Amino acid sequence: MNSRFILLLFVMAGLVVAFAPLPVQPITPQERTFRIDARQYAYSPSEFKVNPGDKVNIQLVSTDVVHGLYVDGYDISIEADPGQTKTLSFVADKPGSFRFRCNVTCGAMHPFMIGKLTVGTNNWLYRSIGLAVLAVIGFLPLSSFIPQTKNMD
Amino acid sequence: MSRFELTRIPFIKNTLKSRYPQLAVFIVMLVGYIFAILAGLIGTPVGSHNFSIVFVWIAWWAILILVAVPFFGRGWCAVCPIPLPGEWLQRGAVLSPPDKKPKWLNLRWPKFLRNIWMQNISFLLLALFSSVLLTTPNITGIVLAAMLFAAIGLSTIFERRAFCRYLCPVGGFIGLYSQTAPIELRIKDKQICVTCEGKPCYNGSANGYGCPWDVFPGGLTKNTYCGLCMECIRTCPHDNIAINLRPFSADLAKPSTRMDEAFKAFIMLGSAMIYAGVLLGPWGAFKDAAYNVGTSAWFIYAVIFLAIIFVILPGFFTLGILKTKGSLPLKQRFASLATALIPLGLMFWVAFSLSFVLTNASYIIAAFSDPLGLGWNLFGTANAVWQPMLTFVLAPAQTLALVGGLIWSARTAQKAANEIRTSSISVIAFSFILTLVMLWLLL
Amino acid sequence: MKRSELISRILITVAIVSVVGAPLYFWSHTPLIHVHIAEDGGWSPDVIKANVNEPLNLKLTSDDVVHGFAVGQMDMQSVDVLPGKVADVTLNFDKPGIYTFFCTRWCGINHWRMRGTIEVSGSPADPSTSSGQRPEPASVPMYVTLGLDIDAPHDSPSIPFSQPSAINGQQLAVNLPIDRSTEYYLGNSPYQVFDELGSTSLTEIQRWNVVASIWQSNTTPESLANGQHLFAQNCAACHGENGAGNGVFADDLAAADESSMQTMAGSDNMTMQSPVDFTNPTRMLGASPALLQGKILRGGMGTGMPMWGSIFTEEQIWDLIAYLYSFQFDYHN
């Protein structure tokens, strides 16, 4: 086995970790309703999870000034004044983890008013951890041996 | 390693050697910079609709960290407008050296400050106030103006570009990360420099000025302190200066042994992680603490910020390399092995900035037409709405950056460890753990 | 000096002078009304002068969060004032007087303090051409003519066991000798009418149903819809979207007490109260429309309840009151 072959092996393994389709466990879709309070500059709750296929209703309650809620990846949004709760309904058909953020300028830190919606499992996180592990495994034997090989020559 | 000399192409060489193309770029940059100061001071206090915030912290930052630094190293320094007014005053000319030199103090920079600790401090000063700085046009305007005037002041007291070399908060990390860039300015033949009389590249001549960055090009081995100002190309009487294309991270093969540079690597690494958690995370309390400068929450934030950078990260790093066998003292092992954190930190910043920039780039379009928030519509795009871009490629792109950064860092660690005959395992493990944390924060 | 050097210097000087001068010129020639949350100063300026029958052009920009602009008692669409954006408004006044403008988008617990005035001078135009603008000084409100003390307790001594149904009351009311004038409805609380119906042979719940039907007959679906709209926009943030007094600012109001007040001149002694619960029958059934009108017109005098007299038209207030009673009466089935 030469090193080029090993490298190829690692690249193949990396591609598998990055792109292999995952088994989808069949979960009956549910309707889920969340009430999210928005204030300068945070949502509460700021993180929530649903299952793929769920019908999600987000009730946005602004508690100080006008806020909005935009969901990355889904490209949908809603805006709510204090006293006028608005509901954003959508089917969570894209798995993964998505940031949701305020889309109505609500003060200085508005660009950083962020929450997190996870649909199913946060696949990219696990895939990237897999890739990182793979990368380190590829380096570990080399790392410990290099000083000795250098000593030998 | 293989190099390709770009200056062999006559067009490139002539463009770099002539002062006019550079001057044209300088004027555009200076006009933009002054406009940013003005916009910060008189424009709308709403950052996302003010030229100063949108063009500095979104557009410039995106170009700097995603393009200029990774691909052109100190390319930004080559066109940066901040030192220009001071330098023109100092030189008494905007083009070739004048017949009569103006009389300024022209002092040497004090010896004990000839390191990048001042840059580490100036960066941290901005970093601790960054939530306010990033979002408040007024403050951004004042900071930009302060840097311009500091550069002018230093030019009249000290020789060359003291501000760029020792004080600029941005210059420190650009220099550190420029070592990874696939571009470099080097001499072609060492022998020519050895026999060269007068060393006009350092001392200046009628054709140009001595190196503004206080570097003797003949001794250049890494990019860190070469500002790509092109003066030596103009002054070298032997046509011995080249701009080369080279492999990425070529400079990292020879690890630095300087503590100021090692800590710069930790500062940048730690800041990227803290920002990823505070600014892009879902935790409102952190944002409040970071924004409300002067409150007790902010002081706690500042202490934690500094502790992560100066105690926690270097502490674990030291613990990791404590037991490794090596002939060098711990301090030198520390500085050498910290080289591995340079590509890691750069890619952390890339991953962090990707999210921020792709989300907010659409502000640029609107601010272009109404830079001061006065209701103008110069190019008909003032009403462009905020719309995050390419959010679906964000997670894969960040994975690529972070895992790529880990591999790059591991490879660098191996080379650095090899160079000083020690094991790189603990450094790779350190990089691995930080990468996991960063993945968790961003994905 | 070489010519190239001279030209370069001139070029640089011209570039710098123009990049500083041009924006400064345009900036100083753009009079903007800057809008902040009340705590940071509200409208600046907050007094605007205008002349009768001369178009008044205003450029408004928000320096922090979303605000809105409208002139009280004027038939106009409110204008959103967005952060960093400039909103253009042109107003036309055909009568002199002092008009109140106010913020129309909730921007914090002190949102309702964001008010300013437009002083319109000049002689009134020909009355025949006047549009539906701000009416002549409003007639004396009913609570004054009736001599109601709007701060006195007005609890209903008796309340129904279930929500009274207007539909069920309609049938019963047909043959009853009831005063069907508007004045009677406006001047009496539901409990007073319930009490007067004590002379009939109806049961208690039947009497409440009749009261509900009388209240329904004095409003229209359009009025209720308009009232609901006004309530959502202006009242729900404190009184709650369901009227239960539990709006998003209710807790803040109770907690804020004097602390948030001291920034406002002359209001050191104010104390915040929890907003009224309109679903509470004891309180609502003991209040007549005239009493509620008084409370809305005048405001809560330091309780955090704004004064709406200069903002709502009389018709808007009656619509709002009609909607408030719908928290007590079932108008649907």
Image (cartoon, rainbow, N blue to C red):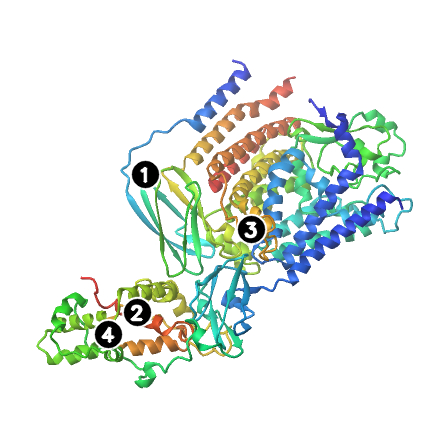
Q: Which residue is mark 4?
A: C285
Rendered image: mark on residue C277: 2
Whether labels 2 and 3 share one chain: no
Q: Is residue B180 left or right of residue C325?
A: right
Please, which chain is the residue tagged with disc 3 on? B
Amino acid type, residue under disc 4 in the picture: Leu
**Residue at 19% over, 79% down:** C179
Q: Which residue is mark 3?
A: B382
Whether labels 3 and 1 share one chain: no
Q: Is residue C150 visible?
A: no
Q: Which residue is mark 1?
A: A53
Q: Helix, strand, or loop for circle 2?
A: loop
Give the spatial CA distance, label 3 vs label 1. Answer: 38 Å
Amino acid type, residue under disc 3 in the picture: Ala
Please, which chain is the residue tagged with disc 2 on? C
Give the spatial CA distance, label 4 vs label 2. Answer: 12 Å
| B133 to A133, vertically: above or below | below
Q: Foreground residue, B416 or B240? A: B240
Amino acid type, residue under disc 2 in the picture: Asp
Crowd tier of the residue under label 3, counting other residues whose Cα lies within 10 Å: few below 14, some 14–19, many 20 or above: many
| B75 to C103, vertically: above or below | above
State the image coordinates of residue B437 (x, y, percent, origin top left). 49, 40
Amino acid type, residue under disc 1 in the picture: Gly
**Residue at 31% over, 82% down:** C152
Whether labels 1 and 2 share one chain: no
Q: Helix, strand, or loop for circle 4?
A: loop
Q: Is residue B193 left or right of residue C289?
A: right
